[in-house]
Amino acid sequence: MTVFGATPLHHSYRELGEQFYSDQLPTPVAAPGLIRLNDALAEQLNLSVAALETDEALLALAGNAVPEGICPIATVYAGHQFGGWNPQLGDGRAILLGEVLAKDGKRYDIQLKGPGQTPYSRMGDGRSPLGPVLREYIVSEAMAALGIPTTRALAAVTTGEIVFRESAQPGAILTRVAQSHIRIGTMQYFSARDDVESVQALADYVIERHYQDAVEKIIKDTGTDPYSALLTCVVEAQARLIAQWMAVGFIHGVMNTDNMLLCGETVDYGPCAFMDAYNPNKVFSSIDTQGRYAYANQAEIGRWNVSWLAQALLPLMADEQDEAISKAEVILGNYIVIFTETYQQLFAEKLGFAQSHLSENNSSPNTVVENNAEVHQLSVELLQLMATAKSDYTLTFRTLTDYLAPEGERHFLNKLMTLPDTFQDWLQRWQALLAKHNVDRATAHTLMLNKNPSYIPRNHLIAAAIEQASQHQDFGLFNQMVDVLARPFEYREENKIFAMPPQPEEEVKQTFCGT
Ligand code: AMP
Ligand code: MG
């Protein structure tokens, strides 16, 4: 038995060709120590938890030993960072060990984040401080539990070494799992070099790995080419992903094209955060001084990012450039349609309206559109009230859920939050609209309980967990947060502090890149 299961890891990405990577071994660390293993994820990945708990596995997770048969690589990419083109990026502090075939039949990357320098490290040390590793573990696992596509955290280890940033901090390594780490920026790297052959090889690989069935269906239905179909799939995945972020109040913070995965998973939990008080212009990243990646800008930035994927794929989409451009324009035009549809549907559900309510009685397509527009208007008005009242985003939706609950089942309304008087008129109109669409309170309540989490990874608690771990080697709060956030929709009185917003003095105003 090997560390990563009964079979050695696969290296399909490495087999694509030398232009895509550099062979790179991790650099051993002084004293590996296990922080946490994600048993549930290990099982989904077909990995043996018993094998991962061994000392041999700890050495592999820290990069001190490379199990037999594994050929670790650092992958190359480029990207637009804050709108500016950078022709040469890559895994500067990450090494891909290989891929596993999971129980769902899909292939997943196993990557070490923070394992030492690579050819793409530029001036960096290739290491991660403990704080960003804990932040990524907590937030990425919380996203997964919320049902939002994301990279996962399989393990976190300490290195026994110090990493120097603004101050000296303990070092750590995260084992990250993704459906793949191929980015829009990976396509851009080859496109910028006019290496159409590599763009095509990569596109074929992405289709086979992530979108085989969907691409075949699009080709069958529309007669288009495979690369236009691939663009259609990625556009849809990004549009849906960003709508899902917004529905839970998530701000990614660094939506550079090198941080957007073609598989549609959220990646790079550097300066990200879930909002406390609702503010559409909220920015968390300390380096985002222009507000480029503010909460409400995310949809538009997503569109800008996928347009760079289109640019890279153009030479494959048609022989004539004009034809390729008109195909790309149609597909990119769909981005905002898919985003808007998803966004409106998610917000309707947050308010208790299932799509079936809005399209009942064989209503005509026009009626469905009108019904959706009416509910959308209601959610816009709610968000305006929330912005004015500076209401806590998560707590407001969860308190509204309680508003429909039987008296004895209310844990939020008038306990954790009192709805402001300014909401009274809106509350009446909301209930009238539920009645108009024949949605009874119990049905709406059940739907809302499944769509409005009690627990999100609160920034002030992440900061406290990081401080306890970094200053006192105490991982208690970190572990508790990971456990509570694994069931974000199940409220328990004993976990009340995880549902509460920060006191003014606890509020975290900025987060920093995971460097
Ligand atoms: P990010 O802002 O996290 O997306 O990182 C941008 C680029 O900088 C990527 O190519 C990273 O691999 C690289 N990078 C960030 N931090 C480090 C570090 N500490 N050492 C080496 N490379 C790094
Ligand atoms: Mg990155």
Image (cartoon, rainbow, N blue to C red):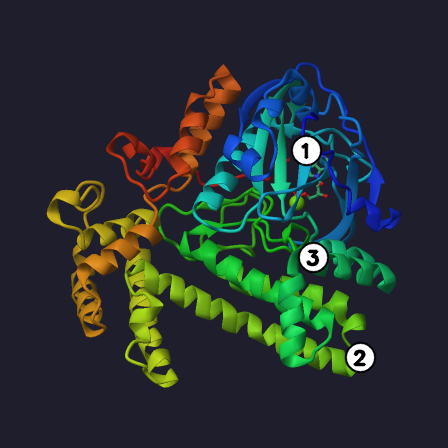
Q: Seen in the image, is 323 located left or right of residue 248?
A: right
Q: Seen in the image, is 288 located left or right of residue 79?
A: left
Q: Disc 1 designates what residue? A: 112
Q: Find numbered disc 2 in the image and state the secondary structure of the residue it sits on.
A: helix
Q: Indicate which label's residue lies in the foreground, 1 or 3.
A: 1
Q: Disc 3 designates what residue? A: 184
Mark sitting earlier along the chain (1/3): 1
x and y, in percent, of residue 451 in the image: 35, 53
Residue at the image point whose x is 17% and y is 44% from the top? 409
Q: Residues within 10 Å of mark 3 (few under 14, many from 20)?
A: many
- Quadrant of the image for the N terminus? top right
- Are circles 1 and 3 on residues that touch, CB within 8 Å? no
Residue at the image point whose x is 71% and y is 19% from the top? 29
Number of the label disc, if any, that sits on residue 321: 2
Q: Residues within 10 Å of mark 1 (few under 14, many from 20)?
A: many
x and y, in percent, of residue 345 in the image: 39, 66
- Quadrant of the image for the C terminus? top right
Q: Find numbered disc 1 in the image and state the secondary structure of the residue it sits on.
A: strand
Q: Nearer the viewer, residue 290 or 190?
A: 190
Q: Amino acid at mark 3?
A: Ile
x and y, in percent, of residue 474 in the image: 47, 17
